[in-house]
């Protein structure tokens, strides 16, 4: 792990003030998993009755802790979360699974809960055996020191090559009670060196039944983490979880996520999750520009998202943005290669609000000088109407592709 | 277009000696489409009776010349090929189509053939109107000067940011006669700045019926051009065509490509096409290493190819290779994200013939030092058994991803 000698130019001005969330205590410990002189284990203790929901990587080579979480999330109950950075415990065979089990077992013993109420994540190098004893030896102190205010420490402990800790917060009224929603995340783009992990955790003191929380979380992920990309490389460990402690004691007879009483809560929840997702893009390896891509006129929302991701993952589009070049021909190319329906002769493209292409060719009104100031800025906005006449639309976010991305990833481990 | 101040370190030592192909004449002209002080139009005149076959980009935003070729290839007859570099005539609306029609019309008039026997391609910037008169004004001289020996001039005229001209050749006996197969190609990876084109043309004096030539070409593309990638960006203009003049007068009562008499011919044909495809990878923008990825143990060949392309397109795998780092964890990641079936706990990986991973974890025998010399070389060989127990296998080729790729593509046009 390189020292943080370079904070992303897209980082927020400061770490947000996170209020306490009733029922949630946290601590960070230095276990020496890989890094020296920094914390690398997060221990989070959750009150009895806490409800859990989660979405995990689609990778066919998922890590041992992802398999552990996937097996236990159906119970919908959580009492602890333990995350280590420095080693992904992925592609580590039976020993990897054993390390996961041992960590869960020791944590459950210390807290006095079932093992299936302990959730785990590991982020760092792939294929290196994880020595579970390094983690288990700090668990006792970690559980003892868990306290409500340690959000900055928690966000720091899960970082790998992140250049800043990531958090977001919201307060909202739910059935007459004020509830808090806090989130923390790590990830330097969708990826980190040695393809560590994108991890994000959302905590609320609201009371939400497990199936409803799962529905809220899955929908939220579909509009946030599933709509960001740095380089299209999918981690073996990607994890997004939500914990609802119910400490506020609100009514919780919600049957599903469409209950109108949940509307404001879901809006706030989505804002927290999207805020975390955007921070991951803002810490994309080598990123110098934050790029929003709006797609409309597609056959359906799924097609729109695929077209958006095709643009967002195109190295040629991303390098053009790095070069501050409004090279819309590359956007046409990326629409064309997506495999989704598009009508070339009705395609329209806007950059920074200026229409650059219309009716299958360059807009006759367009002068390149009009978008130069926009391209020189930090926030780039691309809009594409793919012209099928359909109502499908989607927004995705990415960053530019700079020489620093290559430096970071070619030099790692050498 | 930048001057060629840097020839790819992976370029062949010299341009091959191409024998004449009976029935094929060529010339190159300087039309000033975009570049100055170089040729940019190839005119190829084909004898009466020449059979044509072609495969074209899958892009939904294909260029005007690609649409022209696609509409006319079904006739299976060709008398001329006109290619310009410097302008892709893609996303140029009705004017683009008109420019294509005008070029075909003038060529047909000069040669005395039907317009649908004239094939066209354009490669260069997207979205700029193409002034057809620049091309038509050199056609007369181009047709007049077309001669059998001008292969180096032809390969040069179609280059954009290619750092070397690309050609391959083979001689083989077919039904008792010696036949020649020559090919030329351009492409700096699958892509060129502003996402120009990959173009490749194969010429033979053999007599092959049109449906059989189409079958041979499509199969050959499936094992060559469809198995290479530089950055996963698909051009609006990709074109691979074959022309068989029949000048050797061999028997041609072949019913299909499985005719045993065609076996040696197809082998030679495939070698020429694969040779061109490899040269495109060897001229990949910024490439310093040529990478071969063998995948086996997949459910079927299509799954194997998708897994291979997932590895070959992963920026993390490609930057690790650029950094001479045998980072096999990133290969595991790329297998996992491909979406195809893989058995994590039976996955095996070899780098340069050394087994680095087995049974879902690092090979206990593996020492990193044993692959260091291989990683320092120019030819990197990765083999992956994805462990499903299936017989699916595929080989794909790519290059590494270096800082120079970013420089070339961020700086273009600026």
Image (cartoon, coloured by chain):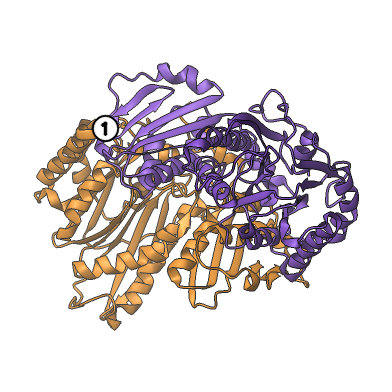
Chain colours: A purple, B orange
**Residue A367: x and y, percent?**
36, 18
* Image position of A132 (left or right of B413): right
**Would you name the residue on which mark 1 appears?**
B130
Front position in the image: A135 or A79: A79
Query: Does the rendering let one see residue B8?
Result: yes
Quadrant of image for the N terminus of chain A:
top right
Horizontally, residue A151 falls left or right of residue B194, namely: right
In the rendered view, would you say B378 is above or below B133?
below
Residue A4 appears in the picture as rendered: no
Q: As displayed, is residue A222 above or below residue B355?
A: above
* Residue sitting at x 44%, y 23%: A352
For the point 38% across and 34% down, the residue is: A329
Horizontal and vertical percent for residue B246? 20, 67
Name the one closer to the observer, A381 or B150: A381
Determine the image quadrant of residue B382: bottom right
Q: Residue at x 77, y 34 (%)?
A: A152
> Measured from the top left, where is residue B229 in percent x and y?
48, 54
Q: Is residue A297 left or right of residue A24?
A: left
User: What is the x, y in percent for residue B189?
Assistant: 47, 49
């Amino acid at each position: 792990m390189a020292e943080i000698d370079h904070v992303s130019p897209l980082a927020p001005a400061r770490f947000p003030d996170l209020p306490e969330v009733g029922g949630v205590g946290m601590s960070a410990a230095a276990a020496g998993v890989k890094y020296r002189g920094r914390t690398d284990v997060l221990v989070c203790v959750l009150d009895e009755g806490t409800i859990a929901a989660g979405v995990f990587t689609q990778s066919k080579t998922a890590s041992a802790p992802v398999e552990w979480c996937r097996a236990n999330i159906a119970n919908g109950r959580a009492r602890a979360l333990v995350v280590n950075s420095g080693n992904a415990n992925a592609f580590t065979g039976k020993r990897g699974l054993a390390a996961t089990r041992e960590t869960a077992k020791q944590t459950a013993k210390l807290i006095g809960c079932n093992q299936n109420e302990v959730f785990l994540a590991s982020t760092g190098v792939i294929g290196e055996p994880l020595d579970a004893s390094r983690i288990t030896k700090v668990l006792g102190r970690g559980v003892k020191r868990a306290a409500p205010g340690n959000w900055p420490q928690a966000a720091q402990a899960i970082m790998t090559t992140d250049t800043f800790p990531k958090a977001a917060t919201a307060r909202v009224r739910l059935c007459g009670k004020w509830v808090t929603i806090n989130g923390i995340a790590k990830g330097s783009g969708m990826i980190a060196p040695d393809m560590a992990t994108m991890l994000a955790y959302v905590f609320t003191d609201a009371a939400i039944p497990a199936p409803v929380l799962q529905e809220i979380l899955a929908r939220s992920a579909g509009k946030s983490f599933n709509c960001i990309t740095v380089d299209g490389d999918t981690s073996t460990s990607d994890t997004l979880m939500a914990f609802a402690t119910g400490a506020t004691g609100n009514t919780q007879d919600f049957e599903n996520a469409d209950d109108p009483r949940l509307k404001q809560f879901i809006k706030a929840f989505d804002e927290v999750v999207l805020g975390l997702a955007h921070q991951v893009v803002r810490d994309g390896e080598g990123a110098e520009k934050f790029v929003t891509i709006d797609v409309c006129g597609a056959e359906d929302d799924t097609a729109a998202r695929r077209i958006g991701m095709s643009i967002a993952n195109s190295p040629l589009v991303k390098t053009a943005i790095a070069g501050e070049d409004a090279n819309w021909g590359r956007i046409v190319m990326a629409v064309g290669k997506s495999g989704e329906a598009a009508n070339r002769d009705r395609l329209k493209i806007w950059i920074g609000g200026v229409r650059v292409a219309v009716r299958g060719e360059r807009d006759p009104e367009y002068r390149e000088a009009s978008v130069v100031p926009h391209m020189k800025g930090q926030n780039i906005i691309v809009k594409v109407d793919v012209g099928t006449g359909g109502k499908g639309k989607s927004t995705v976010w990415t960053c530019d592709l700079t020489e620093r991305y290559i430096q970071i990833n070619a030099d790692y481990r050498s």
